[in-house]
Image (spheres, rainbow, N blue to C red):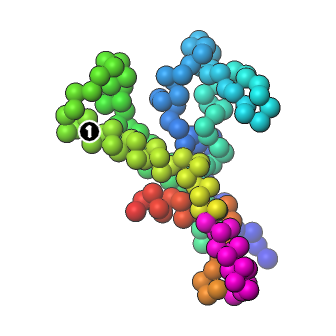
Amino acid sequence: MTSAPKVRTNAAENQHYVPKFILRNFLADEARGQVSVFDKQNGKSFPTSISNIMAERRFNDFQVNDGWRVSFEPAAGKVEEQVLATYRRVVASGRLERTVEEQSDLALLISFQFLRAKAHRDLWLQVDQMIADKTTELGFKVENIEGWVPPTEDNIKARHLEGMRK
């Protein structure tokens, strides 16, 4: 048995689901590029670099068909590039001009940010769990449902990213 080929992408290893250009607006230490983080689980605050938050290793990458690894990171970067100038102008001026271009850019940024968030991805796993629970409650096995595929990190990512694309 041979292992699947590893395909490298040009995407960053640590991929943000909140862009760094947004995170920079919350710097507690500008010289170090750090924000103050509050850990709700243990009730403690600590400083960390914006490179370490609102991101995960290969968040936008997933494996398909016998080891091919694909990435949505370049597309996410293009959306960010498209709205960056408008975003920076609004933040710098503190006001909206209400032009068609500005409204379009901000609508794209807000909707894309909503869809790309980790919480939105986690909904896919919750839906799978609800289907499994309801199927069991009705006396059936989810494994017997035609077309059912057990959730994996890769297929959850693929569904999430496909949902964004659509």
Q: In this view, does 124 lie above or below 29?
A: below
Q: Residue at x 48, y 51 (%)?
A: 115
Q: Identify the residue at the far front of this view.
A: 137
* Viewer-side residue, 165 vs 115: 115
Residue topped by disc 1: 103
Q: Is residue 52 above or below residue 116?
A: above
Q: Does the magenta stretch include residue 38?
A: no
Is residue 118 placed above or below 66 in the rendered structure? above
Span shown in magenta? 127-144
- Residue 65 percent coordinates (x, y): 60, 72
Q: In this view, does 102 lie above or below 137?
A: above
Residue 32 pos. (x, y %): 62, 15
Across and down, in percent, residue 12 comes to: 58, 42
Q: How crowded is mark 1: few (under 14 residues within 10 Å), some or many (20 or more)?
A: some
Quadrant of residue 101 in the image?
A: top left
Identify the image quadrant of the N terminus.
bottom right
Say which residue appears at 72% left-offset and 79% top-offset: 137
Q: What residue type is labelled 1?
A: Gln
Q: Nearer the viewer, residue 52 or 73?
A: 52
Magenta stretch, main secondary structure class: helix
Q: State the residue at coordinates (40%, 62%).
A: 166
Q: Is mark 1 on a helix, strand or loop?
A: helix
The foreground one among 52 and 38 is 38
